Image (cartoon, rainbow, N blue to C red):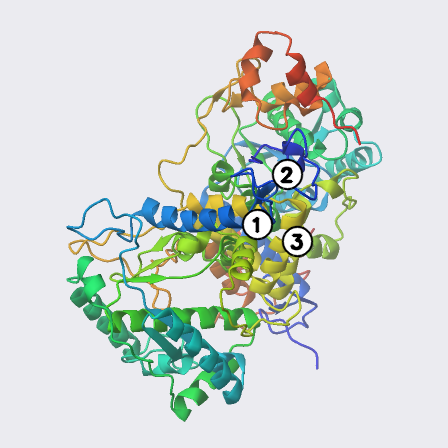
């Protein structure tokens, strides 16, 4: 017996919502999905009228859906935003160059201006070159740190007021789990925030409008709307620690679909004891970017790469920051620790 | 060791990995032959291990100053003796786990003999007795507050206020007489328990409910017999699993009370967990080497597959991760140490914040505008039909909600399906 849509009751249901288990018809699903994002934006006060907003676009499903929905909501509810696409080229052959083509097509489809910044021009290193030096184990750290700064620098070049990224509920839940497993209290407290704090100076605030949208629903939305997106995994990702958290989360979801939101809820409601040492925000003495140490992470990583000591950024080496700043050579024992591991 | 920004592979942290040899020396006394290795590389001989184990227990109690090792008035030179009188409580949950009456009799008898040997007063209580608690609320199927709910809370509050006059020193003297506890239960209670558990569809919910009922019963027995502290035997590994599964269940606000050293939420009775520093490996070795008598009793999740429940999944996840990254459990343990419960202090003057009826933690359902809870409510609303105008042939509920600015839904469908 065909199931009717639980919303409009008139049409036949074509899918079951992963988030709540209700059966919905296509249009009601689109409507519910878009409306939820609208509610998220409104209740968190993420965007204001007249702002220029850069959408971090990688060509993958999250950013494509984000770009699409932002455009739709901007028109439907008259947010009055000036939207544009910002994309980062990490220099991963076979992955990033293909997805960049998708972004260029998105630019035409959604009629939004596009800017691409690349690691090559910003840092002088592509991810392929980095992986050759670092190996396959810790390269995600480099990519993530560099990308964050690349997005900020690109946004500053375009003079935008806010950045929107396509992080979905699964991403945030994975991050909460990962931070518990790694014991990262500082990040644990901040990772469930829907937008980064916007102090007067420094970085441009960024927000996650898709924070409460399930990855499965994003895929369904993109599929039913026939959106154009690039769907391959990064070739370097299989060895990342996040993979463990992701596998765990996927299993949790299969047992109880609401656990993704439950994890986010736990992350939001847990509280840290006072007196736990927290990093204080300052600026990097070399590039002026925000940092909690004397040198920001990307300066440290870059220094390590340029000197042929790729493990410089991996591990606790802030005692060496002073030496790096002063351009002193490191002692032989220190150098030995930082060389790449030979297998 | 392997902290946040450190290498994830524990082995890489040591510059030189000592090659395990057959005759390693104990790392403490340097002369005895090592009989076991705990953590990554610490070898101990038998005597040193026993000393280490017991020392850790004492240090845990002393450091946290919750249980007073010295009574008032006694000289400080007698710190070695643990100056409190313990009782033992065992909850027979065979009714919930589906074990037969004979099995339960058998294990109860075994336990009785072990307990009698220790010389402490003991209580063997069956889970069915949770239904005979004062104005008990745990009736199967009820989820909304009943009048009986409120009276239970009031009774508990009353009890809490009464017992607050009991001071710490009275504990030692208020030891109950050697009673076996009432392990008999009436058939209605048995049926009620079975119905309760069969009404819960998922194993996750069953385990959760079992935990809650057990807590209530332990609490009640402790109160009834004048105990102000309850010690639980949760090890580090078990607590790490519990921390993660509570996060997955959404109990972030209560994490610190569920897994911390002391759990003050019940008012007069404090739950402490002195074993939380021991990994299950240490406990197993100790138990084996020093012949600690134990009874193996199957629980709800024995012999179930990995994905039967959230708790079971978390357990296998942590265990597997631990084998690749040996610092996993200790890192999770340290994370739990840094959390604290959002509990109002036990001040009689302040108005108590509303608490959950089942777990007695402060409610975390304050509907903050931008939160996961709010998002869940919104999703529920949006996916279901509202009791408004149903006669429209446009998708969505009412026209006002769907199309703003009076665009109206044209024959081609609603604006949401345009792109």
Which numbered dot is residue B10? 2
Question: Dot 2 lies on which element?
Answer: helix
Residue at mark 3: B320
**First of labels 3, 2 by sequence position:** 2
Q: Chain of mark 1?
A: A
Q: Is residue B408 visible?
A: no
Residue at 60% x, 49% y is B36
- What residue is at 18 percent from the left and 65 percent from the top? B161
Which residue occupies 64% across, 75% down? A4
Residue B131: give x, y in percent of width and height: 36, 82
- The answer to whether B359 appears left or right of A55 in the picture is left
In the structure shown, which secondary structural element does the residue marked by tag 1 occupy? helix
Labels 1 and 3 touching (C-beta < 8 A) = no
**Please, is residue B277 above or below residue B205 in the view?**
above
State the CA–CA distance, disc 1 to disc 3.
20 Å
**Which numbered disc, 3 or 2, marks the residue closer to the eye?**
2
Q: Chain of mark 3?
A: B
Foreground of the two, A54 or A143: A143
Location of the N terminus of chain B (image quadrant): top right
- Residue B205, position in %: x, y? 51, 70
Question: Are discs 2 and 1 located on one and the same chain?
Answer: no
Q: Is residue A57 above or below residue A125?
A: below
Q: Which residue is mark 1?
A: A173
Q: Disc number at residue B163?
A: none
Judge by depth and name the residue closer to the eye, B197 or B350: B197
Q: Considering depth in this image, is A35 or B17 the residue closer to the camera? A: B17
Residue B105 location, x and y as percent?
47, 85
- Above or below A264: residue B155: below
* Distance CA(mark 3)–CA(mark 2): 14 Å
């Amino acid at each position: 017996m065909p199931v009717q849509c639980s919303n409009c009751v008139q049409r036949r249901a074509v899918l079951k919502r992963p988030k709540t288990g209700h059966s919905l018809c296509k249009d009601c699903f689109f409507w519910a999905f878009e409306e939820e994002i609208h509610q998220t934006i409104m209740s968190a006060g993420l965007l204001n009228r007249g702002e220029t907003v850069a959408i971090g676009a990688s060509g993958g499903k999250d950013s494509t859906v984000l770009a699409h929905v932002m455009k739709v909501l901007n028109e439907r509810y008259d947010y009055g935003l000036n939207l544009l696409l910002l994309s980062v080229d990490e220099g991963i052959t076979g992955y990033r160059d293909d997805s960049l083509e998708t972004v260029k097509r998105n630019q035409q489809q959604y009629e939004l201006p596009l800017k691409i910044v690349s690691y090559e021009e910003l840092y002088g290193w592509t991810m392929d070159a980095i992986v050759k030096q670092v190996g396959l184990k810790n390269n995600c750290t480099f990519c993530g740190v560099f990308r964050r700064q690349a997005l900020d620098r690109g946004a500053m070049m375009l003079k935008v007021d806010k950045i929107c990224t396509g992080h979905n509920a699964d991403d945030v839940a994975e991050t909460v789990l990962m931070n518990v497993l790694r014991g990262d209290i500082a990040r644990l407290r901040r990772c469930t925030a829907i937008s980064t704090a916007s102090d007067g100076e420094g970085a441009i605030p960024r927000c996650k409008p898709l924070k409460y949208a399930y990855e499965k629903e994003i895929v369904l939305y993109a599929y039913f709307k026939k959106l154009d997106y690039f769907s391959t995994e990064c070739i370097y990702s299989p060895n990342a620690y996040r993979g463990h958290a992701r596998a765990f989360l996927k299993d949790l979801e299969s047992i109880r679909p609401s656990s993704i939101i439950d994890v986010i809820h736990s992350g939001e409601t847990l509280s840290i004891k006072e007196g736990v040492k927290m990093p204080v925000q300052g600026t990097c003495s070399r590039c002026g970017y925000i940092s909690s140490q004397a040198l920001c992470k990307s300066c440290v990583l870059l220094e390590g790469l340029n000197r042929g000591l790729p493990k410089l950024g991996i591990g606790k080496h802030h005692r060496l920051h002073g030496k790096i700043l002063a351009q002193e050579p490191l002692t032989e024992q220190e150098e030995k620790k930082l060389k790449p591991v030979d297998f | 060791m392997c902290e946040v920004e450190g290498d994830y592979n524990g082995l890489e942290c040591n510059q030189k990995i000592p090659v395990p040899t057959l005759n390693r020396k104990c790392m403490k006394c340097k002369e005895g032959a090592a009989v076991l290795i705990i953590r990554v590389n610490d070898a101990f001989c038998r005597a040193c291990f026993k000393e280490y184990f017991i020392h850790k227990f004492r240090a845990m109690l002393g450091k946290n100053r919750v249980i007073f090792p010295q009574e008032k008035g006694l000289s400080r030179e007698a710190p070695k003796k643990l100056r409190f009188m313990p009782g033992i409580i065992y909850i027979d949950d065979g009714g919930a786990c589906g074990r037969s009456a004979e099995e339960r009799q058998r294990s109860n008898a075994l336990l009785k003999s072990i307990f009698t040997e220790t010389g402490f007063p003991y209580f063997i209580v069956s889970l069915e007795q949770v239904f005979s608690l004062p104005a008990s609320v745990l009736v199967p199927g009820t989820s909304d507050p009943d009048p009986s709910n409120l009276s239970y809370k009031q009774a508990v509050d009353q009890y809490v206020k009464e017992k607050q006059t009991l001071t710490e020193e009275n504990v030692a003297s208020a030891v109950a007489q050697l009673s076996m506890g009432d392990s008999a239960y009436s058939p209605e209670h048995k049926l009620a328990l079975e119905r309760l558990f069969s009404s819960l569809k998922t194993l996750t919910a069953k385990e959760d409910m079992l935990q809650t009922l057990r807590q209530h019963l332990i609490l009640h027995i402790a109160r009834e017999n004048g105990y102000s502290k309850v010690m639980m035997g949760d090890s580090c590994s078990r607590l790490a699993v519990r921390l993660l599964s509570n996060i997955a269940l959404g109990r972030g606000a209560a994490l610190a009370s569920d897994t911390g050293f002391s759990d003050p939420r019940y008012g007069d009775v404090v739950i402490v967990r002195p074993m939380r520093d021991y990994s299950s490996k240490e406990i197993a070795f100790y138990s084996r080497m020093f012949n600690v008598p134990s009874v193996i009793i199957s629980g709800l999740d024995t012999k179930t597959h990995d994905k039967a429940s959230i708790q079971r999944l978390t357990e296998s996840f942590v265990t597997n991760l631990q084998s690749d990254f040996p610092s996993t459990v200790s890192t999770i343990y340290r994370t739990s140490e840094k959390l604290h419960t959002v509990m109002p202090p036990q001040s009689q003057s302040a108005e108590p914040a509303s608490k959950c009826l089942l777990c007695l933690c402060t409610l975390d359902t304050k509907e903050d505008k931008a939160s996961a809870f709010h998002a869940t409510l919104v999703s529920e609303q949006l996916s279901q039909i509202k009791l408004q105008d149903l006669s429209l042939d446009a998708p969505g509920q009412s026209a006002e909600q769907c199309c703003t600015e009076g665009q109206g839904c044209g024959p081609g469908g609603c604006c949401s399906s345009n792109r």
